[in-house]
Amino acid sequence: MKTTVRDSAEAGLAARAATPPTAHAGLDLPSDRLDPVSVLERQAASRVPELVPVRHGRMLASPFTYFRGAAAAMAADLAATPDSGLRTQLCGDAHLCNFGMFASPERRLVFDLNDFDETYPGPWEWDVKRLAASLEIAARSNEYGRKHRRAIQLAAVRAYQHAMNTFAGMSELDVWYARADVEDLKDMLKDQLKKARRKAAFDKTVAKARSRDSMRAMAKLTELVGEHRRIAADPPLVVPVADLLPGAEREDLEAVVRGMIGQYRNSLQSDRRRLLDQFAYADLARKVVGVGSVGTRCWIVLMFGRDSADPLLLQVKEAQRSVICEYGGMKTGRADLGCQGRRVVEGQRLMQTVSDIFLGWATVDGIDGQRRDFYARQLADWKGSIAIEEMVPAGMTAYGRLCGWTLARAHARSGDRVAISAYLGEDATFAHAIAEFAEAYAELNERDYDAMRAALRSGRITAEPDHR
């Protein structure tokens, strides 16, 4: 039987009574809290060994880059915090750099969440806390004062709250169709950068995003080898399969990847299978991506359609168990669907307004001698982001509002928006509590970052400089 609006509202109010919004201000962690370096070491065990130092090097660049790679440690910490009891589909890693611009199938530039490696059902406030903590840490990195940092926190969380209250009163279809078209955000986005770059900043950012397509990616990532175009080597970030393995082993891996593409094809809609069939495999390379994802098996697949001027580059990325499930204690709820790649894809489709037309998944045997799950999407399709380090406080405040609205829209699609709205209420109690949490977590993050630096100095871990 479908839950009524009244039932949902009562459930939200009951949750508010059981776990008051003020309870979220605390960060009272257990005495046996997981050592953050141990969490990294545990993750390293399932990753490509020679890439683990690259991951560590990227994380050690700053407290903010450490935070980006430490989703697992934060998931474990969140499991020890008060829980509203209201569940939704989580992004699982909703820091501010995991929001951005990309193309819709209608060739509109939209703003949305864009990383779902950790998506899994869980308490909606966990995503809000990760977003808020990321804003606090980024603001500290930009050397904003405490007054500005607090204003950014309150703006982002209040935007989430106001948006959820609005979505609670909307019809199911209106919520489903709600989205943020970048052109509609022009007035807000154009003033986010420092004064020297404000003029035409928005137009340049949009133009840059729209230039990031398959043709540009091919020009940047490939070279002519005789009469054929191949992926160019840029070790350790990009290593063509021809350089990675000797002849027979290379042929075996390429055969596995070709088989994976065939299986991946079956996860697409029928019209998109027809489109994929027009492209033929040309080359393969291992690629390092992101910060926290470094060391997972990620491939670039170069394909061509009618000729060498008609490329398609797919990113095929390993999907491991979500840190929300692994460290956050979320053992119940929707299962992993038998494939971690499928978990990522279905979570992304549920939370995003629109998704890449080539988004799909596959499970294969034989890569590093293991059965592994993957998901695939276009490597480049109008993807763009705002330079966080170039924001002024007012700009980060506006950006935080946009991220808060976007996260609320994603949660409203998959959770009980009426219950969450009733829990939040109209006042600023929850926003102030989350701002307190974010400040406390930023201080914990700095201590964890220092612990990682100490582990490097002692030789417990190794790191390579960021080659980007």
Image (cartoon, rainbow, N blue to C red):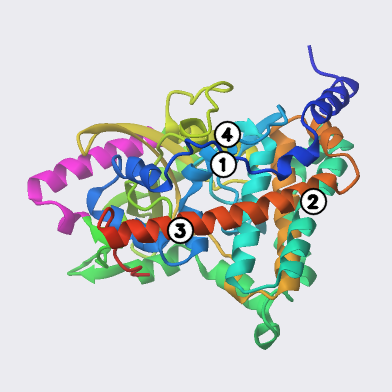
Kind of residue indicated by mark 1? Gly
Q: Calculate the distance from the C-alpha at mark 4 to the C-alpha at mark 3.
A: 20 Å
Q: Calculate the distance from the C-alpha at mark 1 to the C-alpha at mark 4.
A: 12 Å
Q: Which residue is mark 4?
A: 79
Q: Nearer the viewer, residue 169 or 221?
A: 169
* First in sequence: mark 1 vs mark 3: 1
197 displayed left or right of 72: right
- The residue furthest bottom is 196
Q: Nearer the viewer, residue 338 or 433?
A: 433
* First in sequence: mark 1 vs mark 2: 1
Q: Nearer the viewer, mark 1 or mark 3?
A: 3
Mark 3, secondary structure of its residue: helix
Q: Residue at the spot x=25%, y=57% of the render? A: 459
Q: Calculate the distance from the C-alpha at mark 2 to the C-alpha at mark 4.
A: 21 Å
Kind of residue indicated by mark 3? Tyr
Residue 65 in picture, x, y percent from top left: 48, 61
Kind of residue indicated by mark 2? His
Q: Quadrant of residue 236?
A: bottom left
Q: Is residue 467 visible in the rendered structure shown here? A: yes
Mark 4, secondary structure of its residue: loop
Q: Residue at the spot x=79%, y=39% of the render? A: 21
Residue 194 in picture, x, y percent from top left: 67, 81
Q: Which residue is mark 1?
A: 92
Judged by its main secondary structure, the magenta piece is helix
Residue 108 in picture, x, y percent from top left: 66, 58
- The part of the chain drawn in magenta is 241-264
Q: Which residue is mark 3?
A: 449
Q: Which residue is mark 2?
A: 432
